[in-house]
Image (cartoon, grey):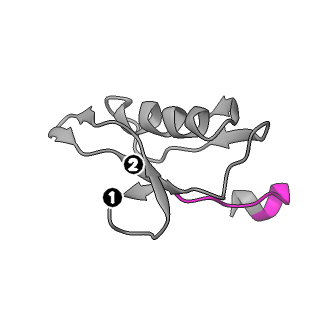
Amino acid sequence: PIALALKKPFIMMRKEGKMPNTIKSSSYDTEYGKRSGLTVQKDRINKGDRVLIIDDLVATGGTLSSAIQLVHACGGTVVECA
């Protein structure tokens, strides 16, 4: 696992309704249609945090864009995407 190798926390972003105490991104498009958005727990990303996003589903870029939006909404900075 990459997070363990880098000795950094692992933060999941998931579909709405899968985790408690979350904030939600706006909806995004996929190759199959529109999705309702991703969520992340409110206390996982803090103002000033530097975040690496790893998206294992790169097709239209919808999930990646949604993840970037969530990091910014929490006050974090995206330093790299993979």
* Whether residue 82 can be seen here: no
Q: Is the magenta stretch mostly helix, strand or loop?
A: loop
Q: How crowded is mark 1: few (under 14 residues within 10 Å), some or many (20 or more)?
A: some
Give the residue displayed 34% in from the left and 57% down from the top: 15
Per the image, the residue denoted by label 1 is: 16
Query: What's the magenta region?
Result: 4-13
Judge whether 53 appears above or below 65 on screen: below
- The local secondary structure at tag 1 comes to loop
Neighbour class for label 2 at 10 Å: few (<14), some, many (≥20)? many
**Is residue 20 in sight in this rendering?**
yes
Q: Mark 1 and 2 residues: CB-CB less than 8 Å, in contact? A: yes
Residue designated by label 2: 38
Return the residue nearer the eye: 6 or 74.
74
Image location of residue 71, percent across then percent down:
59, 38
Q: What element carries label 2?
A: strand
- Residue 17 on image: x %, y %: 32, 66
Q: Position of residue 27 (x, y in %)?
A: 28, 37
Q: How far apart are marks 1 and 2 (CA)?
A: 6 Å
Mark 2 is on which residue type? Answer: Leu
Q: Which amino acid does label 1 sit on?
A: Glu
Identity of the residue drawn at 52% across and 40% down: 70
* Residue pictured at 62% horizontal, 58% vertical: 11
Q: Is residue 13 left or right of residue 42?
A: left
Q: Which of marks 1 and 2 is nearer the N terminus?
A: 1
Q: Where is residue 49 in the image (x, y as percent from the top left)?
A: 78, 41
Q: Which of 23 and 49 is in front in this view?
A: 23
